Image: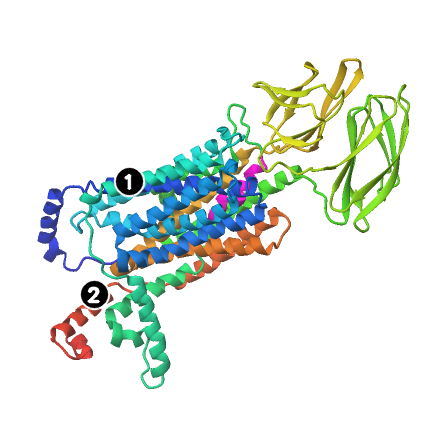
Amino acid sequence: MADDTNGKDVVAEGNNEIEGVEKKLKYPYSVFFIISNEFCERFNYYGMRTILALYLTRKLLFSDDVATILYHSFTTLVYFICIFGAIIADSWWGKFNTILWLSLVYVSGSTVLTLGSVEQWNMPAKTFTFIGLALIAIGSGGIKPCVAAFGGEQFKMPQQAKQLALFFSMFYFSINLGSFISTLVTPILREDVHCMGQQDCFPFGFGLPAILMAVSIVIFVFGKFMYRILPIQGNMLVKVFKCISEAISTKKKEKATNPREHWLEYAEPKFGKKLVMETKILLNVLVLYIPLPIFWALFDQQGSRWTFQATRMDGDLGWFTIKPDQMQVINPLLILTFIPLYELIFYPLLSMIGIRRPLQKITLGGIFAGVAFICSMVVEIAIEPTYPILPKEGWSQFRMYNARPCDYHLSVNLDIENKNFNLSSNSYIHDLWVPIKGESQEFDFVLTTSTQGCDPYIGHGKLETGKANSFLVTGLGPTPSITTFEDDPDKSRQGKPIVRVLANVGETVKVQLRNKDGIEYEDTRHNINQTDIQSTDYDILIGGNVVSTGHAMKTGGVFVVLAHEKAANSYEATVVAITDANSVNMLWLVPQYVIMTLGEVMYSVTGLQFSYTQAPESMKSVIQGCWLLTVAVGNLIVTIIVGAQFFSSQTYEFLLFACLMFVDMIVFAWLGIRYKPIPLDEIKKAEEEEKALKDGKSSDPLEFRENN
């Protein structure tokens, strides 16, 4: 903390006057329009982003890797545009007009995204999505650096310093409240609401946030007659860039003839000592920003990689089923809880072990983020055994299903270790790693049986590289027949169980799956197609009669119903799983979210506070822009690493990010030790010198400094 003891006696009387003025000044109720606007805007942004990753994979059918790249590219764009939003507001439009006009762009993007998600309208969904996200990025990024600052301008300083602090507390609360409610609600709208003939409703999940964004504009405009709108004073960030550019160009020309102690001092003749000194302090702080993006690379994966991780887990709690994207609600909920707990409990405990300085707390926050990714790696190791084994090039998967009341012995002449199988009635056999030379390979097989009334069979088949080739043994008479088809053992992209009915019954006989809510699925065509169904327990009905009960078909599983007619109007049925259901409970993700949020409070809140205290008054908006820029770079890092596809296993990718975070914090700790703050009072001296020169008190800056 800077020493402020000098001159206390001089300003004591003035402070009493300021306190008296502060009591007389009314609280600017206009800020409640701004706070309400921020709540609606954050509801829109976080609500849309919560379900975005699943929309990209489940509706637009992008792979997890491509969806991750698109998700983080969008976030990168949002935070890069923050810089331009600040420049536009401070240099041309002003904060009010910037917020208003770019909010209209924002709501247009949300509307386009919503319209593109309506499948029945047959619009180019991918094109609408990219256009919508681009407009949202321009709108959200453009207004992000303006709203809080515009709210702060409603107060007269320093008379209303305490009231300003209350505003920022309410403002931050509205951000997290909007995030919390939207993260909780939009997954429910996405999955539990059925609209337009679909089993889910992404249009409603995107549409409600879009409506809230439109409401935010109305609220913001209603407050115009109450706002305090300050004149445009020029953008400090632009001045900083010009100052740096001038210093570099002048140094090239005058380095030999006019050496300076610091390279920025070459800009003094054009921009003055005050701006040069402020830029020095800014760059001194920004050196510490170099390692910061890695934290955001980890933090923002809560909406991408961690959400995809949740889709491979079981959210069933018995009394409630957690949606994968709902796990993100933990972060804003814990933020609201942790901030007061840190001040009351955690920081005092840390001070007992010597962690008191802001840079130490930031380092510890980054370490927490690395530990959170170690936790996510451990969870990934636990759920990897439930992943489907998919066919690869150079290999084929061989499955044979028996939907007859006959027990067979199967012999094949494939290049596999086990060439003989027992294929009982209503069962299946498989070999998931059959080597294939070339594009395909033919083979012979023999079915023998000792079951009375069943004939043997000699057949011929073909396996193709990179495919799951399956064979169904069926037929109502003594002689079997073989149906071939391509299997798909992959888990549903909709986050549901998948079922395929292989029934050896009459053409007009219905095979039905019934849960507690009634008939979920029925098959009379026997087209062996796969179908997504709800995650629950099912009874199997054939010909209207229950033939088998209590089959649990849970999220992530790929199931096959095998049924046959064992006698006239008498049936048997069973369910086999060719891919196991998700079995690791989603609650195992809670520790990594808790640890990441612990890190966020120490890293983000402390880091921003430290930056503000170190920066000159005129540079605080620049610091805000540079801080947001670290978020953009962090998301860009994710797109690069994911796009490079260094690892085939998600486990190793999580480990890579954790190691990057730990190394990054070692670098940050080293920079923190070397960091030497530049006294802010030097700026005041420089300002006095410039003022004296301007007033004509001295024509020589050196003479002025010596006399003062």
- Magenta region, residue range: 297-313
Is residue 310 shown in magenta? Answer: yes
Residue type at the position of mark 2 = Lys
Residue 341, can we see it?
Answer: no
Please tell me the numbered disc located at residue 684. Answer: 2
Can you name the residue that lies furthest to the bottom here? 257
The front one of 380 and 238 is 238
Quarter of the picture holding the C terminus: bottom left
Is residue 585 shown in magenta? Answer: no
Q: Relative to 272, is 117 on the left or the right? A: right
Q: Residue at x 14, y 41 (%)?
A: 26
- Asked if residue 677 is positioned above or below residue 65 in the image, the reply reads below
* Residue 514 drawn at (x, y percent): 62, 19
* Residue 429 drawn at (x, y percent): 79, 32
* Residue 436 drawn at (x, y percent): 80, 48
For mark 2, does the 10 Å Cα neighbourhood hold few (<14), some (14 to 19), or many (20 or more) residues? some
